[in-house]
Image (spheres, helix red, strand yellow):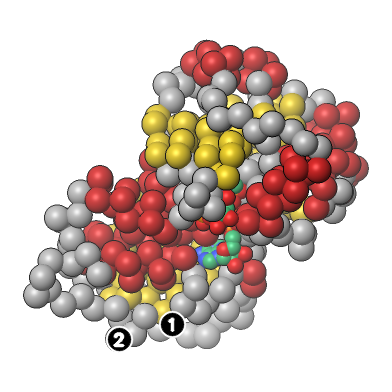
Amino acid sequence: MSGVVSCRVPGKINLDLSVGPVREDGYHELSTVFHAVSVYDRVTVQLADRWSVHVSGPYADRVPTDDTNLALVAARTLARRRPRGLRLSPVRIDIDKQIPVAGGMAGGSADAAGALVACRELWGLDHVENDLLEEIAAGLGSDVPFLLHGGTAIGSGRGEQVTPVLARGELHWVLWAGEGLGLSTPAVYAECDRLRAEQGRRVDPPQPSGELMTALRRMDPEAVAEHLHNDLQEAAVSLRPILAEVLEVGLDLGARAGIVSGSGPTVAFLVGTQAQAIDLSVGLAANGPKGDILRAVGPAAGAALVQWRASAPPPGPQLPGPVPG
Ligand SMILES: C[C@@](CO)(OP(=O)(O)O)[C@H](O)COP(=O)(O)OP(=O)(O)OC[C@H]1O[C@@H](n2ccc(N)nc2=O)[C@H](O)[C@@H]1O
Ligand SMILES: Nc1ncnc2c1ncn2[C@@H]1O[C@H](COP(=O)(O)OP(=O)(O)O)[C@@H](O)[C@H]1O
């Protein structure tokens, strides 16, 4: 196969994040409820003479374009799983980055999942079934398998074991992403451990919340709001105290609940309707600490192929405007 293949992939929030003890491999045992939301990156791949990645979009300047870019790592990892004797061309990867970076929304993992799905198609790797793709995804990062699935799902183990949750209907979210506040995931887990040790807290094995599962089956925003929970929130607020203010302003403005997403610092507010989401977005923009405000609906579908073009467009005249990556 040749041409250009594009994949659309969502960001996630965690409706429940229960962090257990540290394992021997250094990871924490988790029970989480992932929820994909309608904020999407687009990952486009095409055959090229050499490996490269180019990033555009509002958060492009915060994404590495060297060998550490997770989409590039994913494509190269998949290429190593080719059948014996088959030679695969390197690819050029273009990412339209709409998911806030280092925000607890798993944008890097999303790009990795998108690159896996797009490159499998581009290279025609039909032997790579979904199970194998998931195994490769898990090796790339704990959140990556979920971004292949999307929807709402329980994550167990270190988060890489994904079981879909039956949930009908949709939830409306307003997301606040602070400018320049990015948090490193390992630093937030370490702060969580530090706070637990300082307070002498016992750490129990993590459990999914039965009440949240029931609320999700009915997709009742009020009941879901009551059972949102994140064990990393205290650590994220400890490292970025402004998040306490963001949560307070959102709740004062009428959100049913607010929660730090994953390791943060993105804050997700749950509201009842689209109209309430618009009201809250306007209120947060006017009264909240400075940040990007995004409206989203969940659950969103996971990594999905959205475009095949026979060839790359010929280089056109240089028009003023955003410079392509
Ligand atoms: C916190 C969560 C919640 O969904 O997401 P983000 O907020 O980063 O998006 C995840 O657990 C992040 O998953 P991901 O970002 O894929 O992490 P990985 O690359 O696998 O691991 C990065 C580092 O995070 C810590 N880590 C991660 C997962 C886990 N169960 N226990 C951990 O202690 C470890 O320090 C590890 O070295
Ligand atoms: N394609 C990518 N998109 C975003 N970040 C990436 C990417 N590849 C590598 N990274 C690195 O991963 C880090 C974590 O980014 P991200 O996945 O957005 O956050 P989080 O782990 O909080 O969900 C970033 O700071 C960045 O250095």
Camera-side residue of 258 and 170: 258
Q: Which mark is residue 219?
A: none
Locate residue 15: give its quadrant: top right
Camera-side residue of 247 and 47: 247
- Going by the numbered disc 2, the residue's amino acid type is Asp
Residue 183 falls left or right of residue 283: left
- Going by the numbered disc 1, the residue's amino acid type is Gly
Residue 121 falls left or right of residue 261: left
Locate residue 1: give its quadrant: bottom left
Q: Is residue 82 above or below residue 91?
A: above
Q: Residue 106, percent across and down?
A: 55, 51
Please name the residue that numbered disc 2 is placed on.
49
Q: Residue 270, percent across and down?
A: 69, 29
Q: Is residue 101 above or below residue 159?
A: below
- Residue at the image position 61 percent from the left and 80 percent from the top: 320
Task: Name the front one of labels 1 and 2.
Answer: 2
Q: Is residue 296 above or below residue 263?
A: above
Q: Residue 163, percent across and down?
A: 39, 31
Give the Cα distance between marks 1 and 2. 21 Å
Please name the residue that numbered disc 1 is placed on.
316
Q: SS of the residue at dot 1? A: loop
